[in-house]
Image (spheres, rainbow, N blue to C red):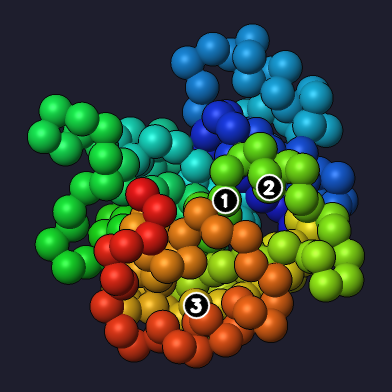
Amino acid sequence: MTRIGIIGSGHIGGNLARLFSAAGHDVLVSFSTDPAKLAELAAGAGATAGTPAHGEVVVLSVPWGVLDEAIEQAGGPGALAGRTVIDTTNQFGRVDGRFGVLDLGGQSAAARNAAKVPGAAWIKAFNTLTAGFQASSAGRTGPDRVVMFYATGDDAAARLAGELITSAGFDPVRTGTLARTEVGHQEPKGDLYGEEFHHDDAVAAVARLRGTPPSGKGRP
């Protein structure tokens, strides 16, 4: 059992609360403007509502534009130092007056966020598939089991990520580190983003893509 604090009560965060709780983990949810809604989510997921200081693992599952606020509510970078952080965010925002994918100047979204909390073991995961698809596909077995891509530069964190992804009902496949030529392929417009993969095809795709710049032709 792992103690997991989830910052964010939206679709992805709420779904992970349910999946992790069902797998037997000790889950706490936080960060909502509506305390009643947060309490309802916690009760329905088999979790509790409170502060993210609860977890040895912290899941950041908030909109891109409020990430700094979420980190501060968690106690700031110092409070997250030494812990494992799972980042589910994607770099969406206003682009030319429309909702779109932000240009981070050649940096991956994961690396941009990890730099905000330099003492944490940073993992990018649970960001490539919609919450609805994650909810409906979790727990499949055999060749239909769905892959969940993840990336981290920390090998100990990679082992933990693999265990947590497996317990949530998916097949973990590591894309690499937080470098744009590795994790960037699982971020918006990357070739692995928004697509359903199964194990062998996922491993082959990662081997083909790793070390190359994201094509920019994947799903936004």
Distance from disc 3 to disc 2, alpha carbons, whole Å, reads 19 Å
Q: Amino acid at mark 1?
A: Leu
Answer with mark 3 or mark 2, whichever residue precedes in sequence.
2
160 relative to 157 in the view: left or right: right
Residue 113 vertical position relative to residue 66 in the rendered view, above or below: below
- Determine which residue is flagged by label 1: 129
Q: Residue at x 53, y 38 (%)?
A: 7
- Determine which residue is flagged by label 2: 134
The quadrant of the image that shows the N terminus is bottom right
Q: Residue at x 32, y 62 (%)?
A: 217
Answer with mark 1 or mark 3, whichever residue precedes in sequence.
1
How many residues crowd mark 2 within 10 Å: few (<14), some (14–19), many (20+)?
A: many
Using the image as rendered, state which of residue 21 and residue 198 is in the foreground.
Answer: 198
Distance from disc 1 to disc 3, alpha carbons, whole Å, reads 15 Å
Quarter of the rendering containing residue 184: bottom left
Quarter of the rendering containing residue 53: top right
Provide the secondary structure element on which disc 1 rests.
loop
Q: Amino acid at mark 2?
A: Gln
In the rendered image, is residue 76 in sight? no
How many residues crowd mark 3 within 10 Å: few (<14), some (14–19), many (20+)?
A: many
How many residues crowd mark 1 within 10 Å: few (<14), some (14–19), many (20+)?
A: many
Does the CB distance between marks 2 and 1 fall below 8 Å? yes
Answer with mark 2 or mark 1, whichever residue precedes in sequence.
1
- Determine which residue is flagged by label 3: 175
Q: Residue at x 21, y 66 (%)?
A: 107
